[in-house]
Image (spheres, rainbow, N blue to C red):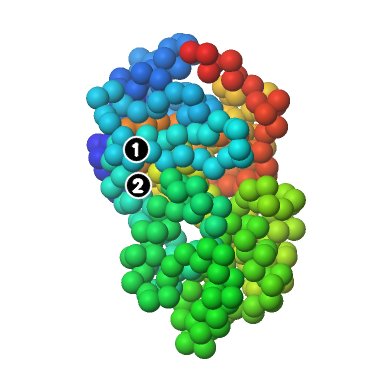
Amino acid sequence: MTITDIFGINSRDQFQDIALKVFNFQFENSIVYRSFCQHLQKSPETVNQISEIPYLPIEFFKKKEVISEGKKPQIIFESSGTTGTITSKHLVSDVSLYEKSFTKGFQLRYGAIKNYCILALLPSYLEKGNSSLIYMVKTLIEKSEHADSGFYLQKGGELKNVLAELQKANSKTLLIGVSYALLDLIEESHIPLKNTIIMETGGMKGRRKEMVREELHKKLMEGFKQTAIHSEYGMTELLSQAYSNGNGIFKCPPWMGIAIRDAEDPLNLVKTGKNGGINIIDLANINSCSFIATQDLGRVYKDNSFEVLGRFDHSDIRGCNLLAL
C-alpha cells in the first residue's frame, strides 16, 4: 500500500506499513519535524518499526509552521483559548483530506449521515470562527440534508422546540455540544430524549467549573434521560477523530492510532493498560505531522480502545525545551 491508501487500511500490519512510509515522507518534507527528529538522532535509517517513530510535542503548533515544504495552507484552523494565551495553528494544505477523514470516520461509527438530524450547540466555537470542529459539524449538517439540522447559538428556546418536534416524529437525532452548553440546556428544562445521541465535545471554556467525566456524564444522563453519553475526541492539530459510545472509552478509525508514553520519560512508550501521556498517529495529517504527543493523560486497552484520564499540568510537561529547535 502507498501513503495515498490510508482510508483503505483494514489491518494492523497495513497501518504499521503506511505509518513508516508517512514517517519517511514527513522527515524528508517537513523542516520542523525533520529538525525535531534529528535532535533525537532519529531518521529513516534508524527508524525501522512504528514504536521507534518520534512524536512531535503538540506545543510546536503554537510557535512553528508545521507544513510540508512547498505546500501552502488552503485553510488555517486555530485552537480555542482564553484571552492572551498563545493558540495552536494547523496549516492544512488540502481540506478535502480533512473532509474525507471526518466523513468516513463518522460513517464507520454511526452509519449514513443522511439518517440523522444534526443539532449543534457549540456557541464558544462559533464565536471564534476558525475552528476545525465547526468546519466538521457544518459539513456534517449539510450532508444530513435535514431541514432542522443546524447550529443553535443562544437559541435555547428554539432548540427545545425543535427537539420536541423531532421526538414526536421519531426522527433519529444527533445533538452535539460543548459541555457547558449541554449543562445549560438541561438546567433550563429537563428534556427526556429518545432516538437521540447526545455527544459532548468536552470543555467548559471558562464558563463553568471543570468537572470529571463521570460527574459530567451523570448530570447529562439524568437531564436527558439517557443511558449513555457519547463523546468526540479530536483537536485542532489533527484531521481525524475518535468517538466514544459511552463510559469514556474511545475507538479510532483504522487510519488513526494511540500510544501511551511514560509521563516521566516522554521518549519511552508504556505497556497496554498503563497510564501516561497520549501520543496520536493520524495518518490523514500527511502534509502536517502525523505523529503528535498531546498534553492529555490516558491509557490504551488490549482492543486498541483508549480512555482519556485528564491533562498534564503545564509544569508537568517534560521535553518542552525542544521547542527551542
Q: Which residue is mark 1?
A: 92
Quadrant placement of the N terminus: top left
Which residue occupies the foreground of this view, 255 or 88?
88
Q: Is residue 252 visible?
A: no
The crowd level at tag 1 (other Cα within 10 Å; few <14, some 14-19, many 20+) is many
How much space separates mark 1 and mark 2, taking CA atoms? Answer: 8 Å
Residue 246 place in picture, x, y as percent: 61, 61
Which residue occupies the foreground of this view, 248 or 161?
161
Which residue occupies the foreground of this view, 242 or 288?
288
Is label 1 or label 2 in front? 1
Give the mark, 1 or 2, whose residue is nearer the N terminus.
1
Q: Residue at x 40, y 31 (%)?
A: 289
Amino acid type, residue under disc 2 in the picture: Tyr
Q: Is residue 36 visible?
A: yes
Q: Residue at x 67, y 65 (%)?
A: 184
Helix or strand or loop: what does disc 2 sit on? helix
Helix or strand or loop: what does disc 1 sit on? strand
Residue 203 place in picture, x, y as percent: 62, 50
Q: Residue at x 48, y 68 (%)?
A: 119
Which residue occupies the foreground of this view, 173 or 121?
121
Badge count? 2
Amino acid type, residue under disc 1 in the picture: Val
Q: Which residue is mark 2?
A: 98
Q: Does residue 100 lie above or below 224 as drawn?
A: above
**Are dots 1 and 2 in contact, CB under 8 Å?**
yes
Residue 269, quarter of picture: top right
Residue 42 place in picture, x, y as percent: 43, 15
